[in-house]
Structures are given as C-alpha cells and as structure tokens.
Amino acid sequence: MGLCYNNYVKITENAFVGAKPELVLKTVFGYDSFRLNQKEIISQVLNGHDTLAVMPTGGGKSICYQIPALIMDGMTVVVSPLISLMQDQVASLEASGIHSVFLNSSLEWEEYLSTVDDIRAGKVKIVYVSPEGLATSRIRELFCENSVKISLITIDEAHCVSQWGHDFRPDYMEISSVRNFFPDAVMLALTATATKQVQQDVIKNLRMKTPSVFISSFNRSNIFLEVQPKRNGAKQVVDFLKNHKGESGIIYCYSRKQVDELTAMLDKMGFSVLNYHAGLSDDVRAKNQDLFIKDKIQIMVATIAFGMGIDKPNVRFVINYDLPKSIEEYYQEIGRAGRDGLPSAALLLFSPGDIHKIRFFFEDSADPQKSEKLLQGMLSFASTRGCRRKALLGYFGELFEPPENESEQKCCCDICATGEIPMVDVTIPAQKLLSCILRTNERFGASYVIDVLLGSRQKRIIDNGHDLVSTWGIGKDIPKDDWFELLEQLMQNNYIYKEGDYNVLKVSYIGRTLLKTRAQIKLPIMLSNIENLQRKDKAAPDYVLHKKSEKISAEKPAENDVEAERIIEELKSWRRRKADDMNVPPYVVFNDKTLLDIAAKKPKVKADLRNVYGIGEAKAEQFGKAILRIVTNE
C-alpha cells in the first residue's frame, strides 16, 4: 500500500475501509491500545451515531475522527478554527501516510486547484476547513459534487459553537446548515473544555441527532497547579525559569506589548526565547512556532493566539503571566503542558489589577454578563484556599478526591504541597475597607473604593467629594494589590457582595455587624505587607461607622466676625501656596465650604479638626498644624 508521497510512505485511499479500529491504530499510528473512551467514541461514529466527546487536552481527540476517516467509505470534513492548527494536523497525518489537505487562505491558487482535483478524484481521506470557509458557496458546491462523498463531519474545538464557551465564534453557528446538504453524514463534536451548559449548547446548535455523549475526566494529574500573588512578575518568571533549566515551556501574556517586553528581557538574560502574537507577520509567527515545535528554542512568550492544537508533547511548563478570562481558557492553556504524561508545572501569577484589564473589554463583548460570570469562576479558582485541583475539576462538574497516599497528594497543587494558608488578623484594614464602601454610599466598584483608600486625587473622586470623607487616604500604607486581595477574601466570606451590571460593592449584614461590634476578623490570606495590615494606629482614627446623630454640619461665620474674616483670607492664601506646591487646583486642598466652617468653629487643637466639615483623618494629619497656626494667629 505504498507509493511515495511528499517524502512519506502513502497509504492508498481505501486500504483500511472496513478494517478493525485496532488494526488501524497499530498499523498507522503505532499504538497498541486506545486511551480512555477513544474506542467507544470510534465505535459510535462507525455505527452512524452523532457523538459529542469532551476530552482533556492531550487526551487523543484527533484519533477519534482519524481512524473512522480511514475505515469509512468516503471523505471526512474537519472544521477547525485556526490555519496553524490545520497545517500541523495535515503535516502529522501525511507523516503517517494519510493523504489529507486543508482549504484556506494560505494556499496559492495553483495549490488550491491541485487540492480540489485530489478531492474530486477521491484521493483525500480528510480535508480541513475553517467555519468561515465552510460557509462559502465555492467550498459547499465542491463538497456537493457527485464525485465527492462525505461520510463524517467533525467539529474540532466545538465549544466555539456555544455562547457560554470561552472562545465563542459566530461563524460556528452556521455549521449546522451543512447537515441539510449531507443528511447521511455522521457528526462528531470534539472539545477539551465544556461545562454542562456548553455541552447542551453544542448539541442544540449543531442540531445533533440523539447523540452519544462521552465525558472524560478533566484531571491532568501530572500537572502541578500553582498560583502566586504577582508582586514582581518579571522576577518571579526568571526565578521559575532558573528552576526549570533546559525545559520547554510557554508563557502566556494578556497583551502584545507585554509579550514583546518579557521576550526582550529574557533574551537579554540569555534565555532561549521567542515571541508570538497577532501583531507579527504570518511568516514570523510561522517561523517562531516551527522553531519552538522543533526544540530549536525552549521558551515561547505568547498571547492566547498561540498553542491551540499544537501537539508538542514535551512542554514541561506553562506560565500564565496574567489572569485568564475564564477557567476554560486557563484549562486549555495549561493543558498544553505534559501531553506526554510526564510531570509538568502550571504557574499562574495573579494580580487583582488584572481583573480590571479584562473588564475593560467587557463593553465590546456580545454578552458582558456572561463574560463576568466566566471571570468570576476564574477568580474563585485563583483565590481558593483549598485544593486547587478539586476547585478546577469541580468547575467542570467532576468530583475529585485527593489520593490517600500522602506523597501523591503533595504533587497535586501548591496548597496541598505546603499546607493551608495561615489565618491572618485583618480586623483593622477590613474595617477601613468596609467603612470606605459605606462612606462612598455603596455606589462604586472595587477600583474606585480602593483608590479612595489610597488617597487618589482623580477628578472623579474630587468631583464626588470623596477626598473629604474620613476614609480618604487611610490605606496608603498598604499596597494596592493587597487591598484587592483583601477585598476578594471579604467577598468570599460574605462580608461584601457585588450588585448590578457594574459590580457595585455592598456591605452585607455580616459586614455591618462587624463594623458596629468591632469584632476581630481573621482570614486565610497571602499578602506582601502583613505587618502594615495588622498595625493599629497610635490614635485610632474614627473611620468606623458614625451614628447619624454624629453627622458634621458646616457653619458660616457671623457677619460681624472680624477674626473669621482674617482666618478666611489667610487660609485662602495658604491654600493657594499649598495647591501650587502640590500642582493641584486649590479646591483639592480644601473647598470654600470647609474654609468657612474652620473660620466659624475656630478649632484650637488637632482633635477639634474632626468636627470640621470636609476634614478627614488624612487631611487633619497633613494640614492640621498649618490650619491651627492660622486660626490661633501664631
């Protein structure tokens, strides 16, 4: 059965029609046994049943259509989302002697015509096409010609057909119409990531006929799961790479800019590294990918555009430099490690600041609420204080029981390896955060509230008058990322919740009770500056809830108060100088209402300033001495 084809031994078109799957597996692919569910899926397809198979990355999905393609009398059409994926699959099949082709924009016209001739002549067993290509009249007319018999239609990355899938593509919705042209063809849908909701969508949107459904375990037990708070991302990456010398790996970044910057830094340090993203030319991307696949370089720094369908078995690690948008995206990315079954590592660097980069694009999303729900699933995983594998598999509806063998259990994830995160007393910062949400009237999201705590002078904060609340600036001694981490933990423990499309922060009944009683609160939390979090101020500021009767009202001086007039004039002069020094408008220092109240109340000591409208603890500390000198005319 063999004539030479492109330097490979070619299997003649109908050599295995009607053969046993085990024979094809051994003869063509060189394997002695099937992996989990492969044989059952192939059997259902050969018996003419539509089939949905959810199998983890590296679980052998391709075999499930490649073997039926050789056994069935006719051609198999594989709908695939990426040109690079098609090219890799065709190269692999040709190396195994199976004549397969792809129809996409990368073909020159002469190549396209030659490929079409082979299809018409019945020389092709498997043809790859994109969903966009399948929708064109030219390709549909070709497939409908009398000389072309289509026995199997395979949808790869089938989660793309679901709006609840992490990579929804509208063009996938058009695939179902193909069934009208080929009613007798079997349909096989394959994906590595599909929750129950996505599975239902795939079956419905592809109009599958009472399909057989196979769900393999999502557990990739050879991949060690680790999450680190991102303090100094570049240094953390370098430290990780030093512990994985000579190993092949992928580093995923959210933006092209980050990819290029990290690649340049690692290259300068002597690492074997290249970059990959949509901003590079097709030739450069193809060259870089080829060098990585052939082990000519060890590390690929890339956006999510890289890696889908890349069957490189010896990827030993995957680093997520930024937070993925969903558990599905994360699972698919880490699944590119350890496809050979050998021990591998998945490191996620988690900064709460990444959340806002992701949410920035939600407005352009077809369904922002769906995007937010997917993101919340990812956040829950990244901030879990229990077994990460259990949390990951639980998302997909799979129950995970850690092995009884202690040594095996320590290979599970960072939490299981190091033990539970210790409880930290966060009473003081928790009070500050909860109070700030209330002081800003529970009308804003996390970023805004934390900016108030950090003393931001953003125009929006000043316009809203929130630079005047008592919680403005009282969190400067705690890093921004730590505030986000604390907020996530308070949410997980039901002290805070989010409401509405804009994720406005609300303080729960439990949180309000905490503020009123000033009870101690301990949380399992990893922070960069625990000492500052636990430090109590020498004179405890009154940022905890005031009773309504304690509300400060602004006063105006009496008309004949000469001393008040002096104070106002001197305060305005001082305010102007201070504003110039700070390079801000005068009202940022104090507005006129506050100056009038100072002149009316004439505070003599620092404690009196707490009864002046618009002076919080931060401003009393920063400007108190100057104000008191003016008032007392010293």
Image (cartoon, helix red, strand yellow):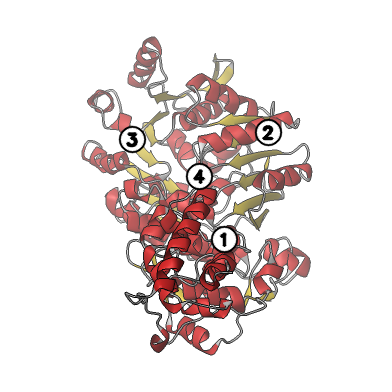
Task: Single out the residue that lies furthest toward the top.
Answer: 110
Distance in Å between CA atoms under marks 1 and 2: 27 Å
**Secondary structure found at label 3:** helix
Q: Which residue is mark 2?
A: 265
State the image quarter where residue 138 is shown. top left
| Numbered tag placed on residue 131 in the rendering | 3
- Residue 462 spot, x, y in % from top left: 40, 59
Residue 104, placed above or below residue 423: above
Task: Check whether the beta carbons of the residues at disc 1 and disc 3 lie within 8 A of each other.
Answer: no
Distance in Å between CA atoms under marks 1 and 3: 33 Å
Give 15 or 269, whichever is nearer the viewer. Answer: 269
Task: Check whether the beta carbons of the residues at disc 2 and disc 3 lie within 8 A of each other.
Answer: no
The amino acid type of the residue labelled 4 equals Lys
Give 81 or 510, whichever is nearer the viewer. Answer: 510
Residue at figure coordinates x 54%, y 15% from the top left? 6
Which of the two labelled residues, at mark 2 and mark 3, occupies the earlier sequence position?
3
**Mark 3 Cα within 10 Å, few/some/many (few <14, many 20+)?**
many
Q: Is residue 306 visible?
A: no
Q: Which residue is mark 1?
A: 382
Q: Which residue is mark 4?
A: 61
Residue at figure coordinates x 35%, y 61% from the top left? 502
